[in-house]
Image (spheres, grey):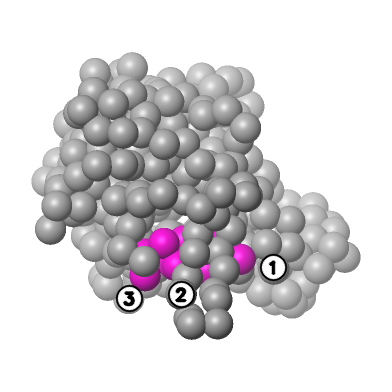
């Protein structure tokens, strides 16, 4: 069985290396593929061929998508998603499934789906109307402005002055960027990352702020991780979030608040796990590989 790990770095990053090692340790053949190096074609008979570089891609039973890369145009984004769909149609088991990745990548769309499923999320606005965004910032006083697509907390800004928020909104609009803004939810001194694989919770951590003046708990932003066994309510929320979005594995970010109870901030369909693994001893790469192998054998 040949299993691929798909990313767009020239060399595998740490999670990709761990996945390749886990595949090898199961006696299977690991393959690392840069998504920008993959191509597809249709001949006059309707036959689809997938290429890697100039060579036909030999049979790949399953693929774990770690990243579709930092796309710089709509065309590039659409092409890469279409490519992954072609792999699915040609019989490769893609993890996470493309539909689930698309839902999770759009942060607002994901929160909307979760909210409709009865899961608590922050009050959120996505708009291209500066005035409407300004009214939202005035209403809450303290708001978080985020990229609509992104991870690791990069680009997220906390503002407690509507006039400063207005300047940010105006700048975003000048670059034809949408405005994605949330109420600032007062949480405890930590939030939770719940790592779900194949319908169950593999491990969970509390993430604490360690930098003075920082408000983000992301490990990539200097947050400290500590192993944590969350209550059943949190586990059920995380598992349900993955079911709603159609994900086979994900990192679900949840905060405990005094006013609203537990609130889901985000669901990451290609989460990093170094901090979680170091804090808990969990081995996500092995669990993810096992989940993919099980589906490839169906």
> Measuring 21% from the left and 35% from the top, which residue is drawn there?
287
- Element under disc 3: helix
In this view of the protein, can residue 37 be seen by the observer?
A: no
Q: Earlier in the sequence, mark 1 or mark 2?
A: 2
Say few, some or many: other residues with alpha carbon within 10 Å of mark 2 (under 14 / 14 to 19 / 20 or more).
few
Tell me the magenta residue range: 79-89
- Element under disc 2: loop
Q: Quadrant of the C terminus?
A: bottom left
Cα distance in 3D space between marks 1 and 3: 28 Å
Q: Which mark is residue 116?
A: 3
Residue under label 1 = 74
Residue reaching furthest to the front: 45
Q: Quadrant of the N terminus?
A: top left
Magenta-drawn stretch contains 80:
yes
Residue 177 horizontal/vertical position (percent)? 75, 65
Q: Earlier in the sequence, mark 1 or mark 3?
A: 1
Mark whose residue sits in front, 1 or 3? 1
Residue under label 2 = 47
> Measuring 55% from the left and 82% from the top, which residue is drawn there?
44
Q: Which mark is residue 196?
A: none
């Amino acid at each position: 069985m040949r299993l691929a790990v798909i990313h767009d770095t020239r060399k595998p990053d740490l999670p990709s290396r761990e996945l390749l090692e886990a595949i090898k340790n199961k006696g299977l053949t690991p393959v690392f593929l840069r998504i920008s190096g993959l191509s597809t074609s249709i001949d006059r008979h309707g036959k689809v061929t997938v290429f890697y570089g100039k060579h036909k891609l030999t049979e790949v039973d399953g693929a774990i998508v770690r990243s579709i890369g930092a796309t710089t145009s709509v065309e590039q984004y659409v092409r890469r998603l279409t490519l992954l769909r072609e792999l699915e149609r040609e019989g490769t088991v893609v993890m996470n499934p493309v539909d689930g990745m698309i839902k999770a990548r759009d942060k607002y769309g994901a929160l909307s789906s979760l909210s409709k499923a009865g899961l608590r999320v922050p009050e959120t606005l996505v708009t291209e109307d500066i005035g409407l965004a300004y009214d939202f910032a005035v209403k809450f006083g303290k708001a978080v402005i985020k990229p609509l697509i992104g991870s690791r907390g990069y680009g997220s800004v906390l503002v407690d002055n509507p006039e400063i928020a207005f300047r940010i909104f105006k700048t975003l609009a000048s670059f034809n960027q949408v405005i994605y803004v949330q109420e600032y939810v007062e949480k405890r001194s930590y939030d939770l990352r719940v790592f779900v694989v194949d319908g169950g919770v593999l491990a969970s951590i509390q993430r604490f702020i360690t930098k003075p003046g920082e408000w983000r708990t992301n490990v990539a932003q200097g947050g400290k991780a500590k192993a944590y066994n969350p209550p059943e309510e949190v586990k059920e929320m995380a598992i349900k979030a993955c079911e709603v979005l159609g994900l086979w594995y994900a990192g679900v970010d949840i905060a405990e608040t005094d006013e609203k109870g537990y609130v889901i901030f985000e669901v990451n369909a290609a989460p990093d796990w170094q901090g979680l693994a170091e804090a808990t001893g969990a081995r996500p790469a092995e669990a993810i590989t096992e989940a993919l192998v099980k589906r490839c054998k169906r």
